Image: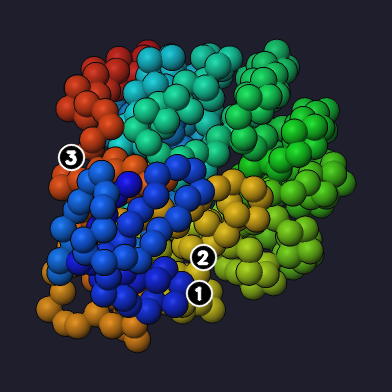
């Protein structure tokens, strides 16, 4: 057990503060106890003058993009979102090998831990190193100590054989670990593949994790090919009868689709930083209901930043306020609990928050959006285990992993421009 001594605990939902010491149980789904400063524990952390609150969950991540930072310019400069996919991301994912995937997962999990994110819902793609890729990622996340809910991005864009292989990878992985059945955007998934993906999800009593209406091209090509909207196509295929679906992005829905989403019980995952970077538009929540959570789409692993961007962009294009966006940040935990995935109270962060003004129950949310930064996080505790403390990852050799990943990145970048 860990004792967080002399802490100020902030309830993650009510923002009430409690001056206390906190005994943290180790184990999946375990809890915390408020105790005296002399309680016995295996490890004691002095939190005098510091705040403790719940860690974060990333509702939509992409491990496969981890080695992209600083990469060479693509062979052709993209002029729209379709070309961004073709010349950057679809070029990158085809070049990933097993070691690159392992290092991508390790560095992503490390980044999550250092930014107070102790659980990530990931959507992976590596068509030329497909079989076993999800297990590589899972083992890397386990090694760092970050929780995960994984899916492989099923698509027909690399041909029928690869589509079949990706369906088999999803089925095989779900036999041994909890996860979701991933799909790329509707316009790259043929009808027989979509139906098979839904069948696999139903078999394992899980949902699908799919990009929807991120760019107008998804709606345009889906309507041209299948005669219906993206969401109507998913409804007709039975995908929306599944429990635990995650719909990524959802920027270009019409009113009918918004009604379909709301009535389906599916969760939307909003990725404001990525949308801004790709210039695909702005998320609006009108008519979608309240099952909305936040992700990063692989751009980074910083959920504080993700929430702040969602607010600053959303204020201009959506009817949102600080409370609504903060709830969306915390909704990822709600998603996990609703769908039987443990995320206990023993997922915590310690913040050394150097504010020039008082932080109270009444103004916490203002501090979160206009003061909090990932640099304030001094400790991350995942399932009651300390995985990050005072600038150092405790579970793996970060320095060596970063050296290895730098070498792998150079190999990947050279391959991408051949």
Nearer to us of marks 3 and 2 is: 3
Q: Which residue is drawn at 15% across and 66% down?
A: 48
Q: Are marks 3 and 1 in contact (CB under 8 Å)?
A: no
How far is disc 1 from disc 2 in space, using C-alphas?
6 Å
Instruction: Using the image, determine if residue 391 lies above or below residue 204.
Output: below
What residue sits right under mark 3 in the picture?
Answer: 392
Question: Which residue is painted at 57% across and 59% down in the image?
Answer: 334
Q: Which mark is residue 249?
A: none
Q: Position of residue 370 (x, y in %)?
A: 27, 73
- Label 3's element? strand
Residue 306 seen by the camera: no
Mark 2 crowd level (few <14, some 14–19, many ≥20, 10 Å Cα): many
Do the CB atoms of the residues marked 1 and 2 lie less than 8 Å apart?
yes
Q: Which of marks 3 and 2 is nearer the N terminus?
A: 2
Residue 306 pos. (x, y %) = 39, 58
Q: Name the residue under label 2.
A: 328
User: In terms of secondary structure, where does tag 1 sit?
Assistant: helix
Quadrant assignment for the C terminus: top left
Q: Quadrant of residue 77?
A: top left
């Amino acid at each position: 057990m860990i004792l967080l001594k002399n802490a100020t605990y902030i309830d993650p939902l009510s923002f009430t503060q409690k001056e206390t010491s906190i005994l943290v149980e180790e184990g999946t789904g375990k809890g915390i106890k408020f105790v005296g400063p002399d309680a016995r524990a295996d490890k004691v952390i002095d939190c005098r003058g510091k705040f403790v609150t719940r860690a974060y969950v990333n509702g939509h991540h992409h491990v496969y993009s981890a080695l992209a930072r600083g990469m060479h310019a693509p062979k052709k400069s993209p002029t729209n979102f379709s070309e961004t996919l073709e010349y950057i991301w679809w070029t990158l994912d085809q070049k990933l090998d097993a070691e690159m995937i392992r290092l991508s997962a390790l560095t992503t999990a490390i980044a999550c831990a250092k930014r107070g994110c102790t659980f990530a819902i990931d959507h992976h793609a590596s068509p030329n190193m497909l079989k076993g890729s999800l297990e590589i990622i899972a083992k890397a996340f386990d090694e760092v100590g970050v929780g995960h809910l994984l899916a492989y991005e099923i698509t027909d864009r690399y041909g029928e054989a690869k589509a079949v292989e990706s369906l088999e990878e999803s089925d095989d992985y779900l036999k041994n670990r909890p996860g979701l059945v991933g799909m790329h955007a509707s316009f790259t998934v043929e009808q027989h593949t979509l139906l098979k993906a839904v069948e696999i999800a139903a078999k394992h009593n899980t949902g699908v994790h799919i990009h929807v209406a991120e760019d107008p091209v998804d709606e345009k090509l889906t309507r041209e090919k299948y005669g219906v909207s993206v969401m109507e196509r998913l409804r007709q295929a039975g995908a929306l009868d599944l429990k635990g679906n995650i719909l990524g992005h959802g920027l270009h829905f019409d009113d009918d689709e918004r009604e379909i989403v709301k009535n389906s019980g599916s969760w939307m995952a909003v990725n404001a930083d990525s949308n801004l970077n790709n210039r695909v538009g702005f998320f609006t929540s009108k008519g979608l209901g309240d099952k909305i959570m936040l992700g990063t789409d692989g751009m980074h692993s910083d959920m504080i930043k993700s929430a702040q961007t969602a607010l600053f962009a959303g204020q201009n294009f959506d009817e949102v306020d600080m409370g609504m966006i903060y709830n969306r940040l915390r909704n990822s935990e709600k998603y996990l609990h609703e769908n039987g995935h443990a995320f206990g109270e023993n997922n915590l962060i310690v913040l050394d928050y150097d504010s020039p003004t008082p932080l109270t129950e009444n103004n916490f949310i203002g501090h979160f959006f206009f003061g909090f930064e990932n640099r304030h996080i001094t400790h991350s505790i995942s399932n009651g285990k300390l995985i990050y403390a005072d600038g150092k990852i405790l579970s793996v050799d970060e320095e060596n992993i970063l050296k290895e990943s730098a070498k792998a990145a150079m190999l990947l970048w050279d391959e991408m421009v051949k």
